[in-house]
Image (cartoon, rainbow, N blue to C red):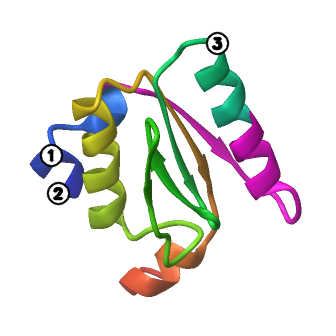
Amino acid sequence: MAAKFYDEPTTQLQLIGVTGTNGKTTTASLLYQLFMHLGYKSGLIATTGILIDEQKIEATHTTPDSITLNKLLNEMVEAGCEYAFMEVSSHSVYRTGFTD
C-alpha cells in the first residue's frame, strides 16, 4: 500500500540493496559517492544517514519501515535521482510485526 500511495518509486529508480553481516554501510556509501562523482543524481539510505542527492537526513534505523522507505524513495525521485543505494537488514521486518 505504501508503494502505491507514493506512486511506486522503485519503478522510477535503479535501486541497489546491499546485504550481509559486515560492510553494508561502507559498500552502499562508496557506491553512492562513486555514482555522484560520475554525475548521476543518487540517494543513499544507510545507518550513517540518508542522502537525497546532497541533502542529508538523520537515520533512525539501518532499514526504514515500508512507509518511511517508500516516502524517502519518492523524495529521491522528485529530486531527480536516478539511483538509490541502501543497506538492507531485517530491522524493518521486526518493527512492522510481520515476523510470523
Q: What residue type is labelled 3?
A: Leu
Disc 2 vs disc 1: Cβ atoms closer than 8 Å?
yes
Q: Nearer the viewer, residue 20 or 68?
A: 68
Task: Tell me the residue that label 3 is attached to.
Answer: 38
Query: Dot 1 surroundings within 10 Å: few (below 14), some, or many (20 or more)?
Result: few
Query: Dot 2 surroundings within 10 Å: few (below 14), some, or many (20 or more)?
Result: few
Q: Give the range drawn in magenta.
A: 12-30
**Location of residue 21 in the rendering, given as x and y in whole percent from the top left corner:** 86, 65
Q: What residue type is labelled 1?
A: Lys
Q: Distance between the residues labelled 1 and 3?
A: 31 Å
Given the current orientation, which residue lies at the most extreme left position? Answer: 5
Disc 1 vs disc 3: Cβ atoms closer than 8 Å?
no
Can residue 100 be seen here? The reply is: no
**Location of residue 34 in the rendering, given as x and y in whole percent from the top left corner:** 71, 25
Q: Which circle marks residue 4 in the picture? A: 1
Task: Say if the magenta span includes residue 28.
Answer: yes
Task: Tell me the residue that label 2 is attached to.
Answer: 1
